[in-house]
Image (cartoon, grey):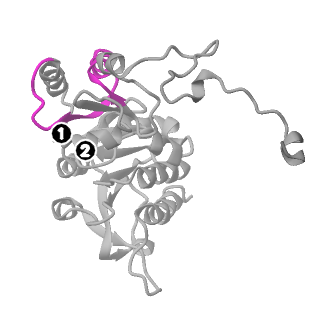
Amino acid sequence: MTEKRKNRPPRKSFDNSCRNDARPVRRENDTPLKNREEWAQEGIHGDYENGAVIGRNAVRELLKSERSVDKLLVQRGERTGSITVLVAQAIERGIPVIETDKQKLDAIAGFAPHQGVIAYAAEKEYCTVDDILAIAKERGEAPLIVICDGITDPYNLGAIIRCAECCGAHGLIIPKRRAAGLSPLVTKASAGAIEHLAIAKVTNIAATVEELKEKGVWTYAAEAGGESLYNTDFRGPCAIVMGSEGNGVSQLVRKTCDAVVSIPMYGRVNSFNVSTAAAILLAEAAHRHHEV
C-alpha cells in the first residue's frame, strides 16, 4: 500500500438510502410517505402558487365550502363518474367549466395526479356592482370604478388592483371568462391591496357598462385615438375600462362606453403596459375627484 493511500481519511459508511433499490428513509416528524396510488385516491390540495386545487376529492370539498371559485378545468373526454357530479355542481353555481388537454392539466398540477379535474379558487369573496356603488355612497364620494376587460396576466391584474386602491377607487370589476381571476399571484402583485378593494365578477362587461350608465356613472374606454385624459372631466361618477394586453378594450365594450380617453404619447413606442396606463389614468381621475 502506498504512503498516499495510508494517509487518506477513512471512508464514511453508506446508509441504505444510497442504494438504488432502497426506499427513502423516514425520519422522525416527517410526513408519512405515500405511493402514487394513495395520492391518486386522495387528490391533492396543495399550497400551489397558481391557486389551483387539484384532484377530485379536493375539488369536491372546495365546492362544498361555498368559497368563490373562478373556474373548473376538466380533461377533454373525462365526463364520467364523480367528475360528472362536480361539473353539474359547478354549472349550478355559475362557475365556468372549461375542457382542456391532459398536457395542460399536467403542467398546472406540476405532474402530480390530477384525476382529470382542477379548480381555481378565488383569493377573496367577490362582491356585486351594487356593493361597489354602496361603498362610494357610504364614503360620501362620487363613484370611481375600474373595469378590466379581459386582463389575462395575473401580475398586470394585481398591479391594477394596487393602483386602484392607492388612488381611492371604490371597486374593480372583472369578467368571469377569458380573464385572470383572483389567484395567489394576483394577491402577491397587488402588495396586499386586494384585501382593501371591493372586486366584482360579472358575466358580461358590456352589459355591466350599460348598467352603470343607467345609474348615472360615466364610462370611459382607455384606448388610443380618444380625448386626452387631461381634457377629460373625471369629477363626477365615472368608470375607466382597461383593455386586454393584446387587443385592448373589445369593440363592443368600446362602443358601449360614453367616451374614449387616451394618454398623450411623445416617444417612439406607441403604447404603455396596461397596468402603467391604469396608474396614469387613475392618478389623474383621483386628482379630479378630490379637487376642492
Q: Is 80 within the magenta? A: yes
**Type of residue at label 1?**
Ile
In the rendered image, is residue 78 in sight?
A: yes
Residue placed under numbered mark 2 in the picture:
103
Q: Can residue 133 be seen in this view?
A: no
Residue closer to the observer: 237 or 87: 87
The answer to whether 9 is drawn above or below residue 64 in the figure is below
Q: Quadrant of the C terminus?
A: bottom right
Quadrant housing residue 91: top left
Find the magenta span and give its range: 53-81
- Spatial CA span between label 2 and label 1: 14 Å
Closer to the eye: label 2 or 1: 2
Type of amino acid under label 2: Gln
Q: In which quarter of the image is the N terminus?
A: top right
Camera-nearest residue between 20 and 268: 20
**Is the residue marked by circle 1 packed among few (<14), some (14-19), or many (20+) residues within 10 Å?**
some
**Which sits earlier in the primary sequence, circle 2 or circle 1?**
1
Looking at the rendered structure, which numbered label has been put on residue 98? 1
Q: Is 236 located above or below residue 139 in the figure?
A: below
Residue 25 falls in image quadrant: top right
Counting from the top left corner in percent of width and height, residue 287 is at 53, 61
Mark 2 in CB contact with mark 1 (< 8 angstroms): no
